[in-house]
Image (tube, rainbow, N blue to C red):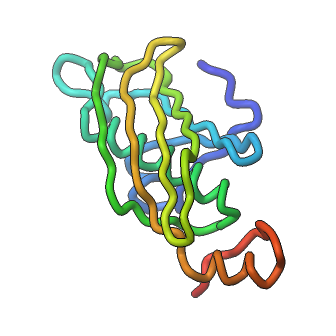
Amino acid sequence: MSDLAGFSVFGEPGGFVHRNGPLYIRSDGDRPVLKMLLGPEHVNRLDIASGGLLMTVLDITLGTTVSAVVGYEGICPTVQINCNLVSSARKGDWLYGEAEVTQETRSLAFATGRLRVGNRTIATASGVFKIPSSVREAQEKSGGRAKTSRQS
């Protein structure tokens, strides 16, 4: 089994991500790393990971990175995402997700990322994410990138 030191389970118990995982996350500052062990529930009859699952993990990878970069502890909703499935991942493989924010405006963040197994790229994505107005308002008040919690 892969080393999970520094990783914690991502997602609310019983929620969508939790039910379709488990997905693990480690925070490296504003560069979260996600990982997931592909089990029988994640693959098709050929033991190859479902494309829909790969796209979901990419969306989460990009979104968590955007939230970390803008200093928001909530979810920055996906506005648009493009995914490219470039290789296959199989049952028993560990997927790793990494992303970076390439540009920010007041209300949007643009990110790119990839999923890999070892050093082999499985899928890539680019996306646009909505930055909640409360994040920018809190930053303007604090004069920086203060962490902003999701408002109830």
Q: Is 66 above or below relative to 27?
A: below
Q: Look at 74% across and 76% down and name the residue there.
A: 139
Which image quadrant is residue 26 in? top right
Q: Look at 83% across and 75% down and name the residue there.
A: 143
Q: Is 91 above or below relative to 35?
A: above
Q: Say which of 17 and 100 sits in front.
A: 100
The number of numbered badges drawn on the structure is 0
From the image, which quarter does the N terminus lie in? top right
Q: Is 39 above or below relative to 21?
A: above
Q: Say which of 145 and 96 sits in front.
A: 145
Q: Look at 62% across and 20% down and name the residue there.
A: 2
Q: Position of residue 63 (x, y in %)?
A: 50, 53
From the image, which quarter does the C terminus lie in? bottom right
**Residue farthest left in this picture:** 45
Q: Is 45 above or below relative to 22?
A: above
Q: Position of residue 37 (x, y in %)?
A: 48, 28
Q: Look at 75% across and 69% down and name the residue there.
A: 147
Q: Say which of 19 and 106 sits in front.
A: 106
Q: Say which of 7 and 101 sits in front.
A: 101
Instruction: Give the side of residue 60 with respect to residue 83, left or right.
Output: right
Q: Position of residue 22 (x, y in %)?
A: 49, 42
Instruction: Give the side of residue 134 with respect to residue 139, left or right.
Output: left
**Residue farthest top in this picture:** 119
Q: Position of residue 93 (x, y in %)?
A: 44, 18
Which image quadrant is residue 32 in? top right
Which image quadrant is residue 78 in? bottom left
